[in-house]
Image (cartoon, coloured by chain):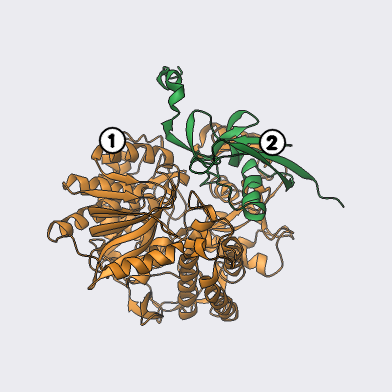
Chain colours: A green, B orange
């Protein structure tokens, strides 16, 4: 029986070495009930150990694993994987490496966003 | 290859930035000292505190009088003390427990003054009165982080401390690596506080976050400190096995404990009746974990290696109504999960198994949080002696706040009376070479592979139920892992945020701590609290009211037994079938 796989497109960037970001696409074996984070950790453990992923608690509390999944900000540990996905860091912050971004360093270009009033 | 080295001088170095570490830092800053706080992850985005749901214990009378909750005025710090010691199966250091129950209201009160909100008061199993002030780990860290930042402590995030520096009988700092760019960091300090939490990640099924790999225990051990009660990792009795998204979630156990869920083996029997017929699923966590593991090991479990946790006997509207009022399951939300998306507890049982949750033992300290090494302090889960053989719900955060403040205070007093020590450059060079070895080695064994092998040993032989044959197999297989450690080599050679490198640096710590657990378990020839020895199924109060101490001597792991520190409660005598007096 053929194993069902899904395609995970991942943002890659090492600001100390790369001039610009790129995307890698990985094929990950699919299990029902797996999270987006499960797929990312699978990539790190079995395909490419150089992938840097932010995560800690895996139960939706710490919020460190919040990433853009198909363009929408969500905690990857509590988000079910339902098909091919694109995973990227939140766009407003400087990237430390790959998916790890620095919430204490908003991107300089986004001054207007950083200064916007907090949502009501 | 050359890597930059950064030297940082400070009065107090605190390793770990969450509840205990942050609290220690705030205290030390109030003493006017320079403080450096180092964390392997990011403050309030990593570590165990955030994962707490969370209840913080104070005696029920204080809950009523100081925090305006529906507490019970019949309770007192003395009765709270009795419950902690009784449910710790009398192995607790009573001197330490006295301090914890006495200072708890004060520590929680100041947290409330600093902005922590309390929403409720709960009564958890093993407590005679409702003592769990309900808040959340996120809330606690929000308060402590803001206080810490204002305090003027220097924060070093994404920095993994790899070893303590010990010179002339005292600790004088620590070394580590900045994970962002791979810079080597040397911290020179008058005193060091370890607040790195437990070592639950040695097991594959755990409720703990990624960082909890026992770094503090192993570093303290290598620096000559003593550790206590290491044979008692605490297991959350029934955590999710499937689906992968929710693996390790405490949902099944918590719901069973608070709403009368049933734990069933594959024949549909409520097996807990064999262990605690009176309290059943509302027994304490140590006993239920042993009961669950026994069913699994004896072939009465579920296909995925667990037992079944069922709520089907409860009326559907009772469960629905529970989600309206109880803080743990408000609106079907448990932790960050929307439970209704994952399970239908009104219809099907959840497959669940014991998962490591907390570390009852830890670095041996006295009432000043001093370890057996001059200048080295321990706080929070890192510090042992408070919980004995089993911890009650809600006591972890209380202990973290109390020891955090005390470690900060006494480390400050020590630092004020001493000068910054000089450090031998040869020591630094050796520790530095050890750090870069896994990324400089051209080829070798994958740290990811070796970590998985280590986790397999823990899962196979070192669950809540153990025996000599299994423990000896664990030692033998652990020996093989240890012999491979010098050959660990990462595939990824980046110095920038290399997770594989971090794993390589954690491996020695995980292996050493697992060995402490195994040696302690072999030495303790009885069953008590969180550890059940199949080959010694009795709780033996005549021979085993002793704490097992682990330490290093001449490069070898040593064990000694010491009598329990008793102040107010005399333990029972005699030999009883586990769970003994409960």
Q: How many marks?
A: 2
Left or right, residue B282 beside residue B194: right
Q: Give the residue at mark 2.
A: A85
Above or below, B349 against B93 in this view is: above
Image point 32% across, 47% down: which residue?
Answer: B22
Q: What kind of element bears circle 2?
A: strand
Q: Give the residue at mark 1.
A: B114
Q: Nearer the viewer, residue B75 or B325?
A: B325
Chain of the residue where label 2 is placed in the rendered structure:
A
Query: Whole-percent x and y of residue B392?
Result: 43, 56
Q: Which mark is residue B302?
A: none
Left or right, residue B371 beside residue B128: left
Query: Whole-percent x and y of residue B344?
Result: 69, 40
Q: Nearer the viewer, mark 1 or mark 2?
A: 2
> Could you give the CA–CA distance between mark 1 and mark 2, rounded to whole angstroms?
42 Å
* Badge 1 and badge 2 in a common chain: no
Left or right, residue B179 beside residue B65: right
Q: What kind of element bears circle 1?
A: loop
Alpha-carbon neighbours of circle 1 within 10 Å: few (<14), some, or many (≥20)? some
Q: Nearer the viewer, residue B296 or B503?
A: B503
Q: Nearer the viewer, residue B33 or B491?
A: B491
Alpha-carbon neighbours of circle 2 within 10 Å: few (<14), some, or many (≥20)? some
Query: Which quadrant would residue B353 be assigned to in this image?
Result: bottom right
Name the quadrant of the N terminus of chain B.
Answer: bottom left
Most distant residue in the right direction: A1
């Amino acid at each position: 029986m053929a194993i069902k796989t899904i395609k995970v497109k991942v943002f890659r960037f090492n600001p100390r070495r790369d001039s610009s970001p790129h995307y890698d696409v990985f094929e990950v074996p699919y299990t029902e009930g797996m999270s987006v984070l499960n797929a990312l950790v699978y990539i790190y453990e079995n395909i490419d150990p150089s992938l840097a992923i932010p995560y800690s608690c895996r139960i939706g509390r710490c919020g460190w694993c919040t990433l853009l999944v198909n363009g929408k900000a969500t905690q990857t540990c509590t988000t079910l994987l339902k098909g091919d996905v694109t995973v990227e860091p939140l766009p407003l912050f400087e990237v430390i490496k790959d998916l790890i971004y620095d919430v204490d360093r908003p991107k300089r270009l986004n001054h207007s966003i950083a200064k916007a009033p907090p949502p009501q | 290859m050359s890597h930059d080295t950064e030297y940082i001088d400070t009065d107090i170095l605190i390793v770990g930035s969450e509840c205990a570490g942050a609290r220690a830092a705030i205290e030390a800053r109030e003493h006017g000292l320079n403080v450096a706080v180092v964390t392997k992850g990011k403050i309030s985005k990593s570590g165990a505190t955030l994962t707490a749901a969370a209840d913080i214990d104070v005696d029920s009378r204080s809950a009523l009088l100081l925090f305006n909750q529906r507490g019970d005025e019949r309770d007192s710090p003395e009765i709270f003390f009795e419950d902690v010691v009784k449910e710790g199966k009398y192995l607790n250091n009573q001197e330490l427990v006295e301090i914890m129950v006495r200072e708890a209201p004060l520590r929680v009160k100041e947290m409330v003054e600093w902005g922590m909100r309390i929403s409720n008061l709960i009564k958890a199993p093993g407590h005679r009165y409702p003592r769990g002030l309900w808040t959340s780990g996120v809330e606690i860290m929000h308060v402590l982080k803001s206080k810490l930042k204002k305090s003027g402590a220097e924060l070093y995030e994404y920095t993994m401390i790899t070893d303590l520096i010990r010179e002339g009988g005292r600790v004088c700092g620590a070394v580590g690596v900045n994970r962002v760019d791979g810079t080597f960091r040397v911290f020179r300090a008058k005193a060091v506080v370890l607040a790195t939490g437990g070592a639950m990640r040695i097991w594959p099924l755990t409720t703990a976050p990624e960082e909890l790999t026992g770094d503090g225990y192993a570093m303290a051990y290598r620096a000559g400190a003593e550790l206590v009660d290491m044979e008692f990792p605490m297991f959350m009795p029934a955590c999710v096995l499937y689906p992968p998204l929710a693996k390790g979630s405490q949902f099944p156990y918590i719901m069973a404990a608070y709403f009368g869920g049933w734990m069933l083996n594959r024949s549909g029997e409520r097996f807990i009746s064999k262990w605690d017929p009176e309290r059943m699923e509302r027994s304490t966590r140590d006993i239920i974990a042993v009961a669950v593991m026994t069913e699994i090991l004896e072939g009465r479990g579920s296909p995925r290696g667990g037992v079944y946790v069922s709520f089907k006997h409860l009326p559907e509207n009772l469960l629905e109504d529970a989600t309206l009022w109880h803080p743990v399951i408000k609106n079907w939300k448990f932790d960050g999960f929307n439970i209704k998306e994952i399970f239908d507890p009104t219809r099907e049982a959840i497959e669940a198994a014991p998962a490591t949750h907390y570390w009852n033992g830890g670095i041996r300290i006295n009432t000043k949080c001093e370890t057996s090494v001059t200048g080295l302090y321990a706080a929070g889960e890192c510090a042992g002696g408070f919980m004995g053989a089993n911890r009650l719900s809600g006591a972890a955060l209380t202990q973290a706040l109390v020891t955090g403040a005390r470690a900060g205070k006494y480390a400050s007093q020590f630092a004020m009376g001493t000068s910054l020590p000089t450090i031998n450059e040869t020591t630094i060079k050796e520790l530095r070479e050890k750090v870069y070895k896994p990324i400089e080695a051209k080829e070798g064994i994958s740290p990811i592979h070796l970590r998985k092998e280590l986790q397999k040993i823990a899962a196979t032989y070192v669950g809540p139920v153990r025996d000599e044959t299994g423990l000896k197999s664990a030692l033998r297989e652990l020996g093989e892992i240890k012999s491979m450690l010098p050959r660990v080599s990462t595939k990824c050679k980046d110095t920038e945020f290399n997770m594989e490198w971090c794993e390589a640096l954690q491996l020695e710590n995980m292996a050493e701590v697992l060995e402490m657990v195994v040696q302690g378990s072999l030495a303790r020839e009885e069953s008590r609290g969180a550890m059940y020895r199949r080959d010694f199924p009795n709780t033996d109060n005549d021979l085993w009211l002793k704490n097992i101490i682990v330490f290093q001597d001449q490069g070898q792991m040593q064990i000694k037994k010491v009598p329990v520190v008793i102040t107010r409660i005399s333990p029972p005598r005699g030999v009883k079938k586990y769970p003994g007096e409960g």
